[in-house]
């Protein structure tokens, strides 16, 4: 599906940032009954989404972006991440509310479809998402979104530069770094080294209260969010065994081949 | 006290409608402020804290960043370049800062709960418009009451303000003034007429960039909160226009007493932060350090002690939070404030002291931070009203409830 796109003038650049509310990265995760325990556990903005937000706000400060909108697809309580997003500098926010029971099974494809629906409505020039969420670690929503809206994608971004209706994305790949140039609208997935997020200063926390949040129920969007995956098992990783010291390269080779069986 | 009415304050909602919320409930904004200040403290203060304590000097970068983060005008309204939060917000900020550094915490405490607060409550519109934005954005202030011969007996102060035409000429010396080394705005208590006793005491605002004659004398070498400047200030024929009188001539006593009642809650919060910071620096170590094949934190002797400490910190925090909420609500809080400061300062000292013992030999070294919390805690029982003064105040409240009239 290809959307007719006319590049907006540089003065009107609209950026949308996807933000996810996840279990705080510092919490010690406990698993019970094949589920990660989330009751009374500290929730925060996904760290990669923080990086995405920071990049969008910086674009606004450099006067490249004129409007930054934060979007979250999540439970009712997730509006707190939108307040944080606005305290960091977003102009407004959209909250697609998902009932608690459904939220547990919401998959990246469903989220991407929701965001694609919003893309039709908002017509942004740039989407910036975190590369992955630290709870699901799927790392696929940005790519799925790009595919659905037929837009180019710059994933694992460690640097972006917007100019003349294009965005240059420096991607971190196994071989080093790759630079791609994408026509707008495009989807960028923020990686760790893209920037160091700020914490909101107190003045902006207060200003954020006046910014509008557009709240909508997910079922009103007319998007198919049916899950396709069934979770079979959730368990904590096996305890790490202590390592051993080897004396020779031959011994190393032997252990790698015969014990670890990786050669 | 109508700032509360002029600004919408979010309701503290409990999960059950109609039921008052627990005192530990925070609004969304307050939670954001709390985590924001925590991040600030970890990012900007923590890396510099050992050096600042050793050098007994606040790093200018910390001051700059504090202004940028909106920490120097927490309650100042947005139209005066402040952060527009409530007193409770200041209390949360002071606690989070003290968890990392008591000295940075007190710098921000004095700026917000004493200096800014005097302007909010007693200054006229012109004074607020002139000074509050600068205090919020780039200028440090200090509260000048104590003199060599007047500490607890504050109103025996000698600094003189002589009326000369449309101005007052200030002469005298103050000591132990927090922020004195970095401030440009001074709220000076001086007497216009010694024969009138406390009724002659007047509060003047002095800006050392406009009025000549203010100089910083010695900076004290202290046991604790070493990076906080504690200065002797000399006022030598400082000519101050009459428009720099805060409220009215003779109202300085009332201003000082009332503001210190409120500042007390700030200090109590600093003490809770220090106690918490000491625990934070100690507890993980207790489960890393093994002796006799056991984590030292698993010995029952240790368990009983740290359980006691956690309980006391919790109690102190509740007292601080409740006192702050009462103030924001316009309810009487003087007794609560005195109790909070008295108790919190005791808890901070006890906790930090125990933390050093729990850590053993390393607790006695500077790198492990705990000894600094112990030194910083001591001032809690002394400044902004000594513990004996708090007990004296509290006894009056208790007596009033029981004694036959």
Image: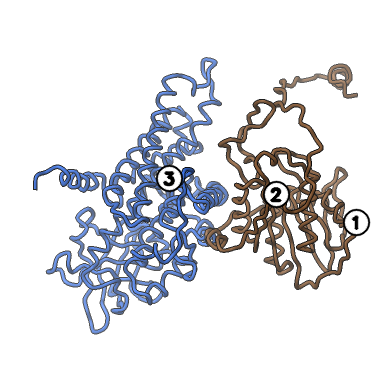
Chain colours: A brown, B blue
Dot 3 falls on a residue whose secondary structure is loop
Q: Name the chain letter of the residue that bears numbered label 1.
A: A
State the residue at coordinates (49%, 62%): B83
The total number of labels drawn is: 3
Coordinates of residue B259 in the picture (x, y in percent): 30, 59
Disc 2 versus disc 1: distance between alpha carbons?
A: 23 Å
> Do the residues at pointers 3 and 1 share their chain?
no
Q: Tell me whether circle 2 and circle 1 mark residues in contact (CB < 8 Å).
A: no
Question: Which numbered disc covers residue A73?
Answer: 2
Give me the chain letter of mark 2. Answer: A
Residue B89 quadrant: bottom left
Whether callout 2 and callout 1 share a subunit is answered yes
Q: Is B26 left, or right, of B377 in this rendering?
A: right
Q: Quick one: label 1, few (<14), some, or many (20+) residues within 10 Å?
A: few
Q: Position of residue A130 (x, y in %)?
A: 74, 49
Q: Nearer the viewer, residue B269 or B101?
A: B269
Location of residue B349 with respect to B166 vertically, above or below: above
Query: Which of the 4 image quarters holds residue A67?
Result: bottom right
Q: Confirm whether residue B120 shows in the render.
A: yes
Which residue is identified by label 1?
A1
Q: Nearer the viewer, residue A62 or B45?
A: A62
């Amino acid at each position: 599906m290809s959307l007719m796109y006319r590049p907006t003038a540089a003065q009107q650049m609209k950026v949308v940032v996807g933000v996810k509310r996840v279990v705080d990265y510092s919490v010690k995760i406990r698993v019970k009954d094949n589920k990660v325990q989330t009751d009374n556990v500290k929730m925060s903005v996904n760290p990669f989404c923080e990086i995405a937000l920071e990049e969008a706000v910086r674009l606004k400060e450099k006067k490249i972006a004129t409007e930054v909108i934060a979007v979250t697809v999540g439970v009712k309580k997730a509006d707190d991440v939108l307040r944080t997003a606005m305290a960091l500098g977003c102009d407004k926010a959209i909250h697609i509310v998902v009932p608690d029971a459904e939220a547990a099974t919401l998959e990246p494809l469903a989220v991407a479809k929701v965001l694609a629906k919003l893309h039709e409505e908002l017509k942004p020039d740039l989407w910036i998402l975190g590369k992955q969420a630290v709870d699901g670690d799927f790392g696929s929503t940005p790519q799925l979104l790009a595919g659905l809206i037929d837009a180019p994608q710059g994933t694992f971004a460690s640097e972006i530069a917007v100019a003349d209706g294009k965005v240059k994305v420096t991607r971190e790949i196994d071989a080093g770094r790759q630079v791609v140039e994408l026509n707008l609208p495009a989807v960028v997935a923020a990686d760790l080294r893209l920037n160091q997020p700020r914490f909101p200063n107190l003045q902006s926390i207060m200003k954020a209260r006046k910014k509008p949040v557009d709240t909508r129920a997910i079922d009103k969007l007319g998007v198919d969010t049916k899950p396709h995956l069934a979770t079979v098992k959730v368990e904590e990783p096996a305890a790490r065994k202590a390592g051993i010291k080897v004396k020779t390269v031959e011994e190393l080779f032997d252990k790698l081949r015969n014990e670890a069986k990786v050669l | 006290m109508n700032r509360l009415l002029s600004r919408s304050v979010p309701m503290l909602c409990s999960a059950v409608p109609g039921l008052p919320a627990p005192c530990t409930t925070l609004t969304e904004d307050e939670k954001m402020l709390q985590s924001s200040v925590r991040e600030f403290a970890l990012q900007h203060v923590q890396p510099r804290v050992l050096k600042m304590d050793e050098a007994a000097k606040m790093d200018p970068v910390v001051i700059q960043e504090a202004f940028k983060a909106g920490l120097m005008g927490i309650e100042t309204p947005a139209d005066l370049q402040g952060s527009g939060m409530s007193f409770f917000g200041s209390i949360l900020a002071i606690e989070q800062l003290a968890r990392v550094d008591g000295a940075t915490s007190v710098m921000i405490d004095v700026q917000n709960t004493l200096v800014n607060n005097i302007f909010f409550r007693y200054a006229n519109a012109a004074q607020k418009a002139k000074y509050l934005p600068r205090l919020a954005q780039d200028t440090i202030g200090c509260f000048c009451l104590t003199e060599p011969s007047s500490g607890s007996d504050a109103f025996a102060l000698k600094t003189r303000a002589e009326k000369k035409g449309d101005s007052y000429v200030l002469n005298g010396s103050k000591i132990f003034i927090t922020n004195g080394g970095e401030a440009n705005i001074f709220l000076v208590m001086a007497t216009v007429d010694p024969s009138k006793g406390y009724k002659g005491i007047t509060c003047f605002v002095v800006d050392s960039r406009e009025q000549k004659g203010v100089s910083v004398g010695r900076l004290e070498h202290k046991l604790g909160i070493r990076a906080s400047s504690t200065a002797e200030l000399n006022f030598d024929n400082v000519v101050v226009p009459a428009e720099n009188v805060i409220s009215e001539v003779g109202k300085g006593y009332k201003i000082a007493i009332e503001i210190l009642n409120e500042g007390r809650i700030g200090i109590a919060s600093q003490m809770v932060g220090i106690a918490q910071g000491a625990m934070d620096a100690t507890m993980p170590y207790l489960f890393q350090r093994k002796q006799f094949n056991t984590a030292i934190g698993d010995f029952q002797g240790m368990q009983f002690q740290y359980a006691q400490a956690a309980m006391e910190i919790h109690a102190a925090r509740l007292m601080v939070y409740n006192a702050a909420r009462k103030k924001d609500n316009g309810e009487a809080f003087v007794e609560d404030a005195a109790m909070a400061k008295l108790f919190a300062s005791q808890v901070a000292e006890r906790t930090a002291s125990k933390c050093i013992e729990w850590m053993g030999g390393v607790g006695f070294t500077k790198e492990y931070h705990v000894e600094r919390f112990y030194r910083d805690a001591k001032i809690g029982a002394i400044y902004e009203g000594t513990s004996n003064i708090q007990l004296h105040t509290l006894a009056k409240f208790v007596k009033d409830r029981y004694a036959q009239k």
